[in-house]
Amino acid sequence: MSSTSIEQKFQNIKKEAEENIASLDDKTVIYVGSASCGLAAGAKEVKDAFINKLDENNIEAEVKEVGCMGFCYAEPIIFISRPGFPTLVYGYVDEGLVESLIKNYLIEDDPCFEFALVATEVNDFFPTFADFPRGVYEEKQILNECGFIDPEEIDHYVSRDGYQALSKALSSSPVEILEEVKNANLRGRGGAGFPAGKKWEACLSNDGDERYVICNADEGDPGAFMDRIMLESNPHMVIEGMVLCAYTIGAKKGYLYIRSEYPQAVKKVQKAIEQAKEKNLLGDSILGSDFSFDLEVFQGAGAFVCGEATALIESMEGGSGIPQTRPPRMAQSGYKDKPTVLNNVKTFAYVPLIINNGSDWFKSTGTEGNPGTAVFALVGKINNTGLVEVPMGTTLRTLIYDVGEGIPGEKEFKAVQIGGPSGGCLPESALDIPIDFDSLGEAGAMMGSGGLVVMDENDCMVTVAKYFLEFTQQESCGKCTFCRLGTKQMLDILTDITKGEGTLESLELLEELAVDIKDGSLCNLGKTAPNPVLTTLRYFKDEYLAHINDGVCPAKMCQDLIVYYIVPERCSKLCSACVGSCPTEAIYTRDDGLKAIEQEKCVKCDNCLKACPPEYYAVEKLSPPEKLKELEEKEGN
């Protein structure tokens, strides 16, 4: 079929989609954010409440589900599109707010600005995204439609230029598409940053009657949920990127490898694949061309090591998810020993934008060696948790303090863990480092897939290193000795240190083991597992020494090195909040009416500290535990 016919066929599909979407313009539509973050916060109950209240009040309006727009801290989130009014986003929605919005907005025409977070378009009444600091620094590319389109309705994506790039590509040669991706210098967003164009070219250069395209959606980093939300919010963008890759390398079959722990993502991707096939945007003779490509979901069992390419392929072929030695590279011998391109969810999502807008457009954002944007999951001790997308080269300080709005509770910043369990912990002095593959690597961390955990003064860096190492040690497949036994020995040393049983000799051994494991491990799980330990030793060694030399946990986090204490001068005889909060009845009322802790019963659950009213602030943690004896002697007990 000629390029004119392909374009005409696509325009017919697009026209039909635009007409279907335009039918919503004359209606009141309530969109409920129903990605995993929204559902966890009660989005389903909010949706049901809207449906019931609309029915009770005989109001004509539609309720639709959309994905996540990134403001996870304010879930459940909804927005209301109503003719004659600005489209407004509301956060922290519960059944009470649903009732208010129905009564005051939909019946009495009061948009309830006091409950609104932001307007989605410029108007005379309420600020938009661009009017907030976050809106100034963010630049949404692949997240632009997330939270605003129904992921289970392909017309929403198509009406916003979705699959336009595919139509354009089918009218071009695969070589032209490859050159555009290469010129864009799109670096893989799975963590390693290897240029996608070079990977595709290497696959294309290998002879073979079959080639495969695989999307790695086996996201398993603690604190990371970028890929999950992308698939739950805009699955067609990823699918279109995969089809473009398949067209470029001549593949006829592809797989989305999604861990089974992501049922929402699996459901939405499967639905999207069905709809794309119905529109002839997937399957045989796509848009009437001579190019055919089939796609299906492969559900992984949820092993972190299967994020490694060779382990992922092994599990797809029915074996155990264990990494294999390389070479041969995936581009030479991947799935079923055929040339295979394996890229991350976000990497594929950028491709339609590059084909639509050109490689120069893509390179106009970011830095020279790291073009484009980066997507992060902001979690931990930060006010605005959620998904953000900023240009490459943005500093960590801007990301944390301007986009994420800083640390809650006026606490001091301590560190940021970037790159997941394979990444590193960076201190305050590293906050002005620009975020890109190269700069973070030089600082001892890595981009990773985009997980970013912020820590404050109450976080112990030895415990943090132990937490991440414990995760990778448990997820090790055990194939190579360095990873299997080396990380176990490192974990034992860290455990001793957090108990105050470490020695300076063991600290030296810890560092030696870390270096040896990085050098000797077979795959990137083992090679990167020591990173949190090495970076905390590099930037927070004084905390290790305090644990070893003085038996003190400076952050008062290690349970074996702390005790809880109620300061008599601040305790109120009239308050018993701590008594009621204690699960082990360790807190009792003294003869003088003040409260005290029976240390033998205390399980250090932190409940009393949280329950103590801020006007008293009477519960304290002491480290080392011997301090308690000094205080008690001073009190004459």
Image: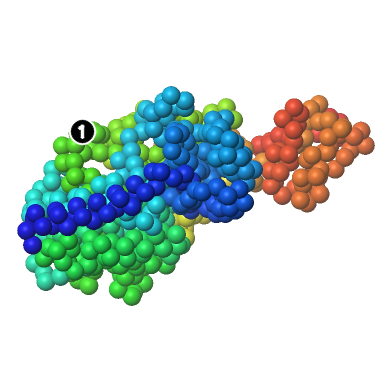
Mark 1: secondary structure: loop
- Provide the residue designation for mark 1: 364
**Quarter placement of the C terminus:** top right
Outermost right residue = 591
Q: Residue at the spot x=87%, y=40% of the render?
A: 589
Residue 305: x and y in percent read 38, 61
Apparent side of residue 210 relative to residue 605 in the rendered image (left or right): left
In the rendered view, would you say 291 is above or below 118? below
Left or right: residue 562 versus residue 595 is left
Q: Is residue 588 left or right of residue 221?
A: right
Q: Viewer-proximal residue, 494 or 207?
A: 207
Residue 417 seen in render: no
Q: Residue at x 23, y 61 (%)?
A: 281
Rendered location of residue 244, percent (x, y) = 19, 56
- Tell me the kind of residue under disc 1: Ser
Q: Residue at x 33, y 38 (%)?
A: 140
Vertical comparison of 145 with 397: above or below: below
The one of 402 and 163 positioned closer to us in this rendering: 163
Looking at the image, which residue is at 87% across and 32% down?
Answer: 573
Which residue is more in the foreground, 632 or 345?
345
Quadrant assignment, res 557: top right
Question: Residue 545: horizontal and vertical position, in percent?
Answer: 52, 37
Q: How many marks?
A: 1
